[in-house]
Structures are given as C-alpha cells and as structure tokens.
Image (tube, grey):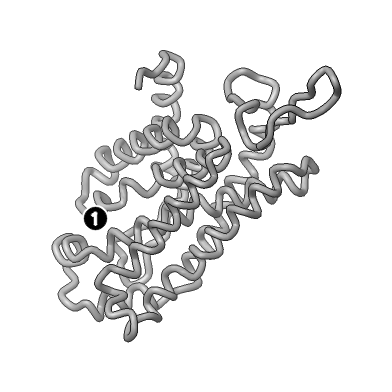
C-alpha cells in the first residue's frame, strides 16, 4: 500500500501528538496488577480511526504507541510490550464502523471476545465461567452497540450525533481493553513478563474489579465525544477527511430528487 505524502505527514503529526499526550495525561494502575497502567491518551486512537480510516488509523496508533513505549518515561519496559496493539485495534474498529465496514468491526470485536473464553483463565468453562463473564459482559454490550451506532448515524440532531460518537468511542476502547485482557491471559505473558506463578492469581486479577474498567471506558468515550463532536463538524466541509465516504454522509440526490446509494 503506497501512502500519499500528505497521509504520511498526518501519521507523523498524530503519532507525535500521541506521544505528547502520553507525557501529560493521567494514568490509572490496573487493579491487582500495578505494573499495567491504563493511560487516557490511548482514547485518542478513536480520533485516528475517524480522521484517517481503519487502516491508516491503525498504523498511526501503532506508531504512536510504539514511540510512547520506546521513549521515556516508559523506556521500553517489558510490561508495556504486550499491549502495543490495544490502541491500534481501537482505531481499526472505529474506522471500520465510521467508514461503512461495520461488519468487519463486528467480526473483529466478536473474535476478540470469543478468544478469551478459550484462554487458560476461563478454562474449563464449566468451572470458571464467571471469569469469562466478568471480563466480557461489557464487551458484549459494546458488540451489540455497533447496531445502535449504525442507526444513530442517520439522525443529525446534536444530541443524537453526540450519542453516535460516544458509543463509537466506547466500542473502540472496549476493543482496546479486550485485546489487553486476551494477551494478559496468555501464559507467556502472565508468567514470564508479570511473574504470576498461579493461575488462580490471574483469575483473581480478572474478577476483582468487573465494573471499574467499564467505568474507565465510559470516561474515555466522553472525552472522545467532547473532542470529536466539534472537530468532525468543522471538518465536514473540508477535504481533509473523506466525510462523503463515511456512515454519516448525507445521501446524494439524483436529478429526479431521489436518494442515490444506500449506507
């Protein structure tokens, strides 16, 4: 895939913005695993998906996360390595939905959710179903919300548009979180990197706070909504973002006055 010069420049600018935000934004340590920090700047990946689309948004978020991981204050700590794909997946899922490929987003998020039920902390499911439920209940809500977002795209009032961006960001951040849960549930990660010697300890880390992480995702979604609502409104009349290719594009009327094309 050959990228235009302008696209490469935007990727560099947004990746630098991601790193700058990583220096000043607050973070929240994960419950029972203080080495893992939930950084609010990761929510900006949703904006990358809106502005740059799923694929370029993915690459931009990956570049930004990689720079933030390599450079101080992280300095390449091994704790952050497994989670580098979390922000890019946020951008990918948001970009898929916003640019009319919501079925791809549904499949991607569903696959991430399903994967956790086959990983060691949830096995055997007949005995440890509560671990899978504690981790994925809010992700199922996010998955169902994809259908709601598609419907909200048709309404143009400021209230509905705010809800549209809120749920879109919530879904993207839940994809971020789901990857984090999946990768932490891999023995190579929880044993070698984080030093968990007991699978029961890993299960405890997952079930101890089933409501805190959804609350964090809601806060991130609110932040994205506050930024996205005026930003995307401003960009609707520009050529910087291909709004006409997005799910919120106004239907094009033919000479007969009928709408051409379907979302």
Q: Quick check: 149 above or below 119? A: above
* Residue on which disc 1 sits: 79
Residue 148 or residue 31, whichever sits in front: 148
Which residue is rendered at x = 38% and y = 64% of the image?
Answer: 114
- Image coordinates for residue 123, horizontal then vertical, percent: 27, 77
Image check: 58 left or right of 82? right
Which residue is rendered at x = 46% and y = 41% of the image?
Answer: 91
Residue 207 or residue 107, whichever sits in front: 107
Image check: 140 left or right of 251? left
**Quadrant into which the C terminus falls:** top right
- Image coordinates for residue 78, horizontal then vertical, percent: 20, 52
Image check: 179 left or right of 17? left
Q: Quick check: 128 above or below 95? A: below
Which residue is rendered at x = 42% and y = 52% of the image?
Answer: 176
Q: Quick check: 30 above or below 202? A: above
- Image coordinates for residue 244, horizontal then vertical, percent: 65, 26
Name the outermost residue toward the top: 5
Element type where label 1 sits in the image: helix
Disc tally is 1
């Amino acid at each position: 895939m050959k990228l235009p010069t302008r696209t490469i420049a935007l990727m560099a600018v947004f990746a630098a913005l991601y790193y700058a935000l990583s220096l000043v934004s607050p973070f929240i340590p994960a419950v029972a695993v203080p080495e893992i920090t939930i950084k609010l700047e990761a929510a900006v990946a949703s904006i990358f998906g809106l502005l740059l689309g799923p694929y370029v948004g993915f690459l931009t978020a990956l570049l930004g996360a990689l720079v933030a991981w390599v450079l101080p204050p992280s300095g390449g700590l091994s704790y952050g390595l497994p989670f580098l794909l979390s922000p890019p997946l946020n951008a990918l899922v948001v970009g898929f939905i916003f640019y009319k490929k919501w079925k791809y987003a549904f499949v991607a998020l569903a696959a991430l959710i399903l994967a956790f039920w086959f990983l060691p902390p949830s096995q055997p499911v007949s005995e440890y179903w509560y671990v899978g439920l504690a981790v994925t209940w809010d992700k199922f809500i996010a998955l169902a919300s994809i259908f709601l977002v598609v419907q909200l795209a048709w309404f143009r009032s400021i209230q509905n548009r705010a809800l549209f961006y809120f749920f879109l960001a919530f879904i993207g951040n839940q994809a971020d979180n789901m990857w984090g849960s999946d990768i932490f549930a891999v023995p190579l990660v929880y044993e070698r990197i984080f030093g968990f010697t007991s699978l029961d300890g890993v299960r405890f880390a997952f079930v101890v706070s089933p409501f805190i992480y959804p609350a964090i995702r809601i806060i991130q979604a609110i932040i994205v909504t506050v930024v996205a609502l005026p930003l995307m409104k401003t960009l609707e009349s520009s050529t910087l973002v291909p709004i006409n290719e997005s799910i919120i594009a106004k239907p094009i009327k033919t000479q007969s006055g009928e709408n051409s094309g379907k979302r």
